[in-house]
Image (tube, helix red, strand yellow):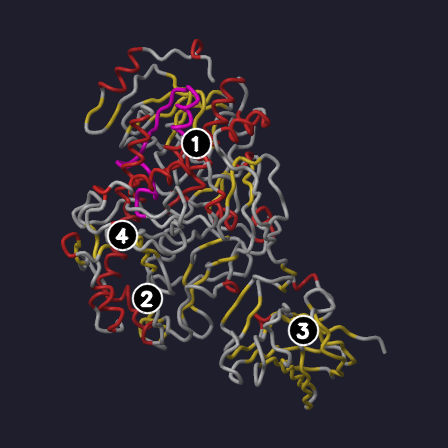
Amino acid sequence: MINRAHFPLTVALILAFFLGTTSGTVHAADDSVHDVVIYGGTSAGIAAAVQVKRMGGSVVVIEPGTRIGGLTTGGLGQTDIGNKAAIGGIAREFYQRVRKYYEQPEHWKWQRSDQFRDSGQSRTGSGEDTMWTFEPSAALSIMHDFVRQYDIPVIYNQRLDRTPISDSTSRVQGVTLEGKRIVSIRTESGQTYRGRIFLDATYEGDLLAGAGVAYTVGRESNAEYDETLNGVQTRQAKHHQIVPGVDAYVIPGDASSGLLPGIDADGPGEGGSGDHRVQAFCFRMCLTDHPPNRIPFAKPEGYDPLDYELLLRNFEAGERGMPWINSSMPNRKTDTNNRTGFSTDFIGQNYDYPEASYAERETIIQRHHDYQQGLMWTLANHPRVPESIRSNVARWGTCRDEFEREDGWQEQLYIREARRMIGATVMTQHHCQGRKVAEAPIGLAAYTMDSHNVQRYVDAEGHARNEGDVQVGGFSPYAIDYGSLTPKTEHCENLLVPVCLSATHIAFGSIRMEPVFMVLGQSSATAAMQAIEADVPVQAIDYAGLKERLVADGQILTWTGPVRKAAASVAPKSLPGIVVDDEAAERTGFHATSQMVGPFVAVGYRHDGDTDKGHQSLRFPVTIKTAGNYELRLAYSPNANRATNVPVIIRAGGSTQTVTVDQRRKPEHSAFATVGKFTFPVGQAEVEINNRDTDGHVIVDAIQLLPLAD
């Protein structure tokens, strides 16, 4: 508990807060000093403010827009989490309040509670005291309840003054520092807010950047932190992919006609290399099929059919999947998200957003709105859209009763990633997969390492492809380190960052879930109050004391449930001899991929799904520079459902040999089993694995050729 004798809250300040409200905006007195100033009324910002109040501190939330709660109140009602048991504290309390909200009959307007089918990844199971699916309006009501209950001053429509101090720094005039400490922030309206500790709870990281704290935008190279899933990921680009063979040019086959909109002529870049590109944004739409509440999809002003030509060609090339995930919410509403190769994600159109001015960001947001509105109109009306999809989409529309806009669209764009601080600790793929453990846990993350597509490019055949989608899980909930919330000491001593925290692109993809942001908001606020009490920089607080308070307040810092270790990946370059991965093979079928069972080579392995026997094969090209005898090995993951008679065909020097491999047998050499010894002349050879007449699942990962001594 903070000693309030040292931090008086004057009657004048109280009057400034509660009598100075006009049009939803509260103006704080310029001479007030708050214990904690929170910039950003996201879910993390509100959770942090609640915690400050519970610890007896003074707080103010500065919200750049008109609505608190961020994505939690902005359409993301199908909570992404991975494992609910990892969430505690104020975050869990929020989802408990959702449950209580929907236990009240008056909150079921468009359907009865017994008519709602809670489904999808976040469905509420029997016996839970929480509920993880909700309408945006329900979430907003609960956030406002928190604000009222704890008397939290929220100041709307106050954007940080981001006028640069100079061209040589990211520092801005709206952030005043004394040494390594922020003493105040000033908004564009001229309002100044002073504090002892500051929290940047925005999705963009404007405060941390404005204070001169180190950060990054885009993807690191794999080499920077010894990762495998960062940087350019053409080899991982299996999900949400364009159907093979879709022409990328305005006039099919004519490169001189130019590329279709949204296709990057400079892509994709070398695999694993870093770049400036940012994963795609979209609006998480709240839709309804209930006519009294439905606003039909309208063609936006300036609609250009060419923007959707790739979508239509993708359907004509064989895409039959619904281009959305339409998750059910109460009252006949949805949380609608991206799915398939051309969907709500506006791929490649957000690279400038993190560093853009406010006016530039508004333009980017409007372009996303126009694109997505045009997409929905196209899906509902265009004759080249398959009739089954067209008729399904046409049943839906935006909701009259959710957002302030007349067209039913929300203002909050899904900013999946913008700036990321480079802090005292950098969370990486190794933390997610358990190879590295947080030294000072302040909460758990549990979601798959997930990145949406980052770019759309044209391949060597003139076809459109997507790149950047990564979905790799299979690990237990893991701890987030306190050092990822703090800048390096030499940069700033009184700033905490619960949203744009210090993590690599791929680790951030696992951490960046709304419940986790609430967890980190609460933990940041707890640390802030302890730093004030001890009068030390945020980097120097007593972690033992922080841990004790977090546990007492219901935070979960250690995973005690079933432990799942991520399957180990083996880098091809670390192996001796000639190694050819499945990604380098010529493939017919074998579309299914996995990373569930390890060890495996590179990014995963392929399997035939135990279907389409005799019609699936992979042919590995092999270049032999030195003639001689070689031991041939095949990488696969064994299981009782595998085939015992997998054909392996070796073609070299004009001769062909065929042997079979029992993939239920455990490989003798880690991921590899010996197939046999064979003679290879100098030149090109080929090793084929197929599923002809096989009696189970066929796994194909990599081959290895080891030279044998004469």
Q: State whether residue 68 is above or below residue 308.
A: above
Position of 224 with respect to 261 (left or right) is: right
Of the two numbered discs 3 and 4 in the rendering, the one whose residue sits closer to the viewer: 4
- Of callouts 3 and 1, which one flags the residue occurring earlier in the amino acid sequence? 1
Residue 587, position in %: x, y?
A: 53, 77
| Residue type, mark 3 in image | Leu
Mark 3 sits on what residue?
Answer: 634
- SS class, disc 2: loop
Residue 69 vs 458, above or below: the answer is above
Disc 1 residue type (three-letter): Arg
User: Which of the marked residues, 1 or 4, is nearer the chain's N terminus?
Assistant: 4
Residue with the mark numbered 4: 114
Q: Which residue is mark 2?
A: 322
Q: Residue furthest bottom?
A: 654
SS at badge 4: helix
Q: Residues within 10 Å of mark 4 (few under 14, many from 20)?
A: few
Q: Nearer the viewer, residue 92 or 566?
A: 92
Q: Which three-letter amino acid code belongs to the residue tagged 4?
A: Asp
Provide residue 446's location: percent of width, then percent of height. 50, 47
Q: Is residue 388 above or below residue 85?
A: below
Q: Quadrant of residue 53?
A: top left
Of badges 4 and 2, nearer the viewer stands 4
